[in-house]
Amino acid sequence: MERPHNFSAGPCILPLEVFEKASQSVIDLDGSGLSILEISHRSAAFVEIIEKARALALEQLNLNNKGYKALFMQGGASMQFLMTAYNLLEKKAGYLDTGTWSANAIKEAKNFGNVEVVASSKDKNYNYIPKQYEVPTDLDYLHCTSNNTIFGTQMKSFPETVKMPLVCDMSSDIFSREIDYSQFDLIYAGAQKNMGPAGATLVVVKEDILGKVTRDIPSMMNYELFIKRESMFNTPPVFSVYVSMLTMEWLARNGGVSAIEKKNQKKSESIYSEIDRNPLFKGFTEKEDRSMMNATFTLKDEKLAPRFDELWQSANINGLNGHRSIGGYRASMYNALSIESVETLVDVMKHFEKTI
Ligand code: PMP
């Protein structure tokens, strides 16, 4: 059976060669006769894997030798909503409210101190990225979400925060485009989009922003402790870290972030130009804020949905339904999705127009 064209929002498509290597390693890790699932996380083999994964993450973000440490943690990006505040929020933090995930981050941070929503796009159901706003100077940090997975908006530039650390949730677009990652002081991302299976969360943190809050931080919430223990304070999510390492190796072999960005641009241009051309569809977001990862769109006439759904499903397309909070459709086009898959979807949209 041919593999479906998988447009799922996450967990999502990963490279087939990564699935193949990972499945071999479940039986026999690199000829050791042991499964990746049964070796000790303290074994030389696994220490090598996590060290490689940590190094590859910094390398792909071009953050080597710039004072950053890469950690693999558990609890998903949702755990980072509170962990960032636990470690960094003393008095007041600023947040950009650009979607459901930012709103969740804001809610968690309020447990630790004052939170100022510096700008919000809630007034238009988060279909744009706020632009004209002033960042107060008395914040412990400013938090933003680079890509809003549900609504399909993406920040193309980031506020300048010379006076405070900039924290960014990059769960759904990490490793997808070339930006200056050194403008951020802390980046976090759940693995389950561009990196690997759910279970691990990558945290890349600049060491010099830590150790400034006065509260006691429990061990499992403490970045400094995780740095000291080389990301092995307790048993890490072994399989997710391993597959993340394989995916980052795949990315490096294929030209890294700059090459994948070109491919991602092609994919997103292809889908958005069809959304704009085809009279049956309309895009959900403002054009200038469109995400390269998640294209959200609706049918102008909702009554045509059963017909369109039948067409894409019979073209072996999977995971195109929009999130329940906005409805319609969402084509998630993460790094491992091929251009051919996007072309298949575009062909279905064209064919749909002809049959109406
Ligand atoms: N932030 C963003 C941008 C996300 O897309 C998601 C999940 N889709 C989350 C946070 C929450 O991630 P997790 O389920 O790993 O807690």
Image: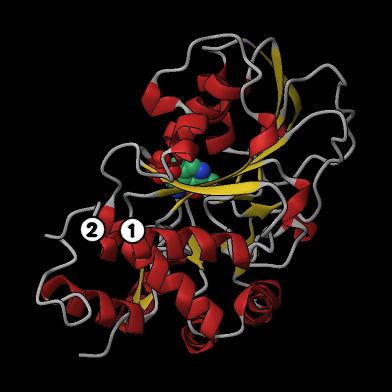
Label 1 CA crowd tier, 10 Å (few <14, some 14–19, many 20+) = some
Vertical order, 131 against 212 (above or below): below
Numbered badge on residue 43: 2
User: From the image, which quarter does the N terminus lie in?
Assistant: bottom left
Q: Quadrant of residue 51?
A: bottom left
Could you say where residue 12 lies in the image, as x and y percent from the top left? 38, 64
Residue 291 showing in the rendered view: yes
Residue at position x 41%, y 67% in the image:
245
Residue at position x 53%, y 62% in the image:
55
Q: Is residue 42 left or right of residue 63?
A: left
Q: CA distance from mark 2 to mark 1?
A: 6 Å
Label 2 CA crowd tier, 10 Å (few <14, some 14–19, many 20+) = few
Could you say where residue 164 lies in the image, as x and y percent from the top left? 80, 29
Label 2 residue SS: loop
Could you say where residue 226 lies in the image, as x and y percent from the top left? 44, 36
Would the CB of label 2 be found within 8 Å of ligand 1?
no
Vertical order, 232 against 113 (above or below): below
